[in-house]
Image (tube, rainbow, N blue to C red):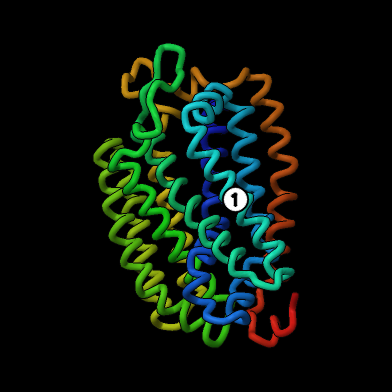
């Protein structure tokens, strides 16, 4: 297998890890006004992601760095053409991170709670918009420079992708809270699953079917089916009180969505509306020497990072109760 193919797959894995782990962080932030009806409930919800969210964001940094190093042409075109949506995502992530760190130190945390909501909802929506546009294709000239505008990115297919990811991450956050909390917060999370699940199934199903017909890759029908089955399985498992299985099923759905998108993208990395101007794994990649060095670095350090993050999740695996957040600051 060529190293360009290896790094395309590795970048897909990195984005999968980011969306899978950061997805429930986004979902908890979106659901905070609903599941946290009082201060203790809000603290419990945020305590569930408190030890994890910053580690989850590392996947985004590594995915961006890997794209820059392995496919610099892709990185340059993506970040120049999508600079405004990506800038909005960055601002939202900063606002959310600051709010998570400082809300408990404030006498009136309502402003921080609004920052948490919008700092979660905006990226959850805009990541779907961005990936939908990457798969659909954007106007590029012969120098692989983006020639469209912001309105070009806000096409119906991309907006559908944003709604799909927002619904899917909201469901992911609800399932995570049902798994990690007790009492009223868990009860409201289970109610949220009953609403977010059908929304994710409907919006995600339509988005993936349209994607499938657009990209025309027969093999990815398998991942489309797996995504629908995962969401449906999460609903069934949650209704039976099996939150662990529900979380696993929804995780399968998110992985299947990413497989569908990257499977439809291959061998392009940034399709153009004029296929002659598309960026592919061949014309967007770094030199073979660079890819070889990166591969050895990945082989050495990736297991270390995975072991450390797995250990973190194991340490903080217990359910939270109101006693755990009583008097916390």
Quadrant of the rendering where the C terminus is positioned: bottom right
Count of numbered circles on the image: 1
Residue 155 location in percent, x, y? 31, 38
Q: Nearer the viewer, residue 275 or 321?
A: 321
- Residue at 69%, 81% in the rendered image: 325
| Residue 139 in sight | yes
The reply, left or right, for residue 94 in relation to residue 9 is right
Left or right of 318 in this view: 134: left
Q: Quadrant of residue 62?
A: top right
Say left or right for 219 vs 85. left
Q: Return the residue at label 1.
A: 93
Instruction: List the single residue furthest toward the front.
Output: 108
Rendered view: 39 above or below 232: below
- Asked which secondary structure carries label 1, the reply is helix
**Residue 39 picture quarter:** bottom right
Vertical placement of residue 180 versus 112, above or below: below
Residue 85 rendering spot, x and y as whole percentages? 48, 39
Q: Position of residue 2 (x, y in %)?
A: 54, 26
Instruction: Look at 26% across and 52% down and name the residue there.
Output: 206
Q: Is residue 285 above or below residue 232?
A: above
Q: Nearer the viewer, residue 247 or 98?
A: 98
142 on left or right of 320 = left
Residue 236, position in %: x, y?
A: 36, 75
Which is nearer the eye, 150 or 18?
A: 150
At x 68% / y 55%, what residue is drawn? 55
* Quarter-of-image position of residue 148: top left
Q: Residues within 10 Å of mark 1 (few under 14, many from 20)?
A: many
Residue positioned 60% across, 20% down in the render: 286
């Amino acid at each position: 297998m060529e190293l360009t193919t290896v790094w395309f797959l590795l970048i897909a894995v990195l984005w999968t890890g980011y969306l899978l782990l950061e997805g429930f962080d986004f979902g908890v932030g979106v659901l905070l006004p609903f599941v946290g009806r009082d201060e203790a409930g809000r603290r419990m919800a945020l305590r569930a992601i408190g030890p994890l969210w910053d580690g989850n964001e590392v996947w985004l940094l590594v995915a961006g760095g890997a794209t820059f190093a392995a496919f610099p042409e892709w990185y340059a075109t993506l970040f120049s053409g999508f600079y405004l949506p990506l800038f909005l995502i960055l601002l939202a992530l900063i606002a959310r991170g600051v709010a998570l760190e400082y809300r408990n130190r404030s006498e009136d945390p309502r402003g921080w709670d609004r920052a948490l909501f919008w700092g979660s909802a905006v990226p959850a929506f805009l990541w779907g918009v961005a990936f939908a546009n990457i798969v659909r294709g954007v106007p590029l000239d012969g120098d692989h420079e983006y020639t469209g505008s912001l309105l070009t990115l806000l096409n119906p297919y991309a907006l559908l992708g944003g709604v799909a990811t927002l619904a899917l991450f909201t469901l992911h956050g609800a399932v995570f809270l049902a798994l990690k909390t007790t009492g009223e917060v868990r009860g409201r999370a289970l109610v949220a699953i009953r609403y977010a699940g059908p929304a994710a199934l409907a919006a995600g199903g339509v988005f993936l079917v349209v994607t499938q017909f657009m990209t025309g890759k027969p093999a990815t029908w398998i991942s489309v089916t797996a995504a629908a089955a995962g969401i449906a399985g999460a609903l069934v498992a949650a209704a039976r009180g099996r939150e662990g299985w529900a979380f696993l099923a929804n995780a399968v759905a998110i992985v299947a969505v990413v497989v569908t998108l990257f499977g439809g993208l291959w061998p392009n990395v940034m399709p153009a509306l004029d296929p002659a101007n598309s960026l592919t794994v061949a014309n967007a990649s770094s030199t073979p020497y660079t890819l070889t060095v990166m591969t050895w670095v990945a082989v050495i350090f990736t297991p270390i990072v995975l072991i450390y993050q797995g250990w973190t999740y194991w340490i903080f695996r217990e359910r939270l109760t109101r006693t755990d957040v009583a008097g916390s600051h």
